[in-house]
Image (tube, coloured by chain):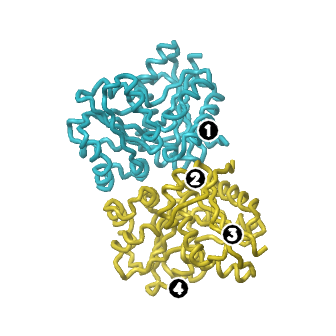
Chain colours: A yellow, B cyan
Amino acid sequence: MSERAIGVFDSGVGGLTVLKEMLRLLPGEELVYLGDTARVPYGSKSPATVLRYALEAAAFLVEQRVKMLVVACNTASSVALDELEERFRLPVVGVIEPGARKAVAVTRSRRVGVIGTEGTIASGAYTRAIHALDPTIAVFSAPCPLFVPLAEEGWAEHSVALLTAREYLAPLMAKGIDTLVLGCTHYPLLKSTLRQVLGDEVALVDSAEETSRTVEAMLNGHRLPRQSDPGGPRFFVTDIPTRFVRVGGAFLGRDLNGVTQVSLD
Amino acid sequence: MSERAIGVFDSGVGGLTVLKEMLRLLPGEELVYLGDTARVPYGSKSPATVLRYALEAAAFLVEQRVKMLVVACNTASSVALDELEERFRLPVVGVIEPGARKAVAVTRSRRVGVIGTEGTIASGAYTRAIHALDPTIAVFSAPCPLFVPLAEEGWAEHSVALLTAREYLAPLMAKGIDTLVLGCTHYPLLKSTLRQVLGDEVALVDSAEETSRTVEAMLNGHRLPRQSDPGGPRFFVTDIPTRFVRVGGAFLGRDLNGVTQVSLD
């Protein structure tokens, strides 16, 4: 069982920021990544539709005989995690709880900001996860729908991104937050732009980093870490790979190879 | 036959700019609109995937017994029009050819710019359509992937949109274009921002307006115009209607009512 791969899925390229951290932290693990690029994005779609897509994506990875599922997409994590755990008899790690835990650990003012897609913010999943750990923390959240297309356009550090970030973050800064959770796997690309707007006093919580630490802990807890040489990650996408390969390189921090198109519906 | 409705489809809300012009120009016609909101957008997806989605959308409308299909989406028009005409025995109107014809009619410098999604621009469909009418016209095109999310965010007249438009249009303006085709059904919302960047000397071609004129001519040509009172348009979407209703109002220029969710896949 421990020799099996870990399955990671996202609506598209965003989850590659999580995969990047997993490659760094867990170099002995074999990784299989699925990007549902024919139906991307999930962030502006309804919980019912996102749940259906997430179940189909997970079923594909389970067919690949993975030992663990990582939902590397905040929108899918916010609506599908319970159902995935119930349906498939595997450990399932989402990106919400690790980010929430880190935010609770680092905040001093007990005023935490959360940014994400429309779907993630509307779900209230971060607020619930933070309050489950500490109900006295005030959580302020804001959907930032333009950050995903800006990151995919390669404009994460463009003046357009800076102007957009100023607009989106102003209401959160007015609330006196000292911690901001990047509640979307695309957002780590925007870190330096967000830092310019927020200054040095606000801690940025990157759920990609926190999630890979949770995966490591879960592997150890289930006695599932892998020992032998894994080879490179395998990639599957639901649209033709061209755009995924072109845009995804910036998210993974290296060239993408060996991408196969599959059908889920 | 002439009493039947006209079927209009798009990946989401963008085609409502075409529907709006059709409601104005063809008040006697019954209109059925389908937005494939569970799989939106089409503009960043591959031709093969967009073709599959377009065939499924058209099949749904044909089941509604429409007398004509209007492909109110530039990306779908650029890859699926021939296949749709072949598969379904109905008149099919796309948005590319009407815009191309208008551009050829209005340009004096014979230097025409075209903006659209990645998919539309990569297809070269506008360049082919313009050159089929006049091969001596120079066509310069640019994908503008951020315009769709900006329009859907309600930021079409925001300073972020202005800065984005300056960046996208600069290379086209440097080519000395005197005409710009808005090759995406979302872009009419950005007209005043585009006008600010382009000045008064560049003609804007709105394919929504041109397409509704083509539909009118086709109806007359096929002796299909309808005479009796049509009632309001009917709307179908593939995701839950909430976001379509909220965002679509700005595109249609009035409140959206009677939206039904359906499944295509």
Q: Mark 1 and mark 2, same subunit?
A: no
Give amino acid for label 3.
Ile
Q: Position of residue A47 (x, y in %)?
A: 61, 57
The residue identified by callout 1 is B52
Q: Earlier in the sequence, mark 3 or mark 4?
A: 3
Mark 1–mark 4 Cα distance, whole angstroms, equals: 48 Å
User: Where on the picture, by quarter, is residue B118?
Assistant: top left
Mark 3–mark 1 Cα distance, whole angstroms, equals: 31 Å
Q: Mark 4 and mark 2, same subunit?
A: yes
**Badge 1 sits on which subunit?**
B
Q: Disc 3 vs disc 2: which is toward the camera? A: 3
Secondary element at image label 2: loop
Q: Position of residue B127 (x, y in %)?
A: 39, 32
Give amino acid for label 1.
Arg
Residue B125, label in figure:
none
**Badge 2 sits on which subunit?**
A
The residue identified by callout 4 is A105
The residue identified by callout 2 is A37
The residue identified by callout 3 is A6
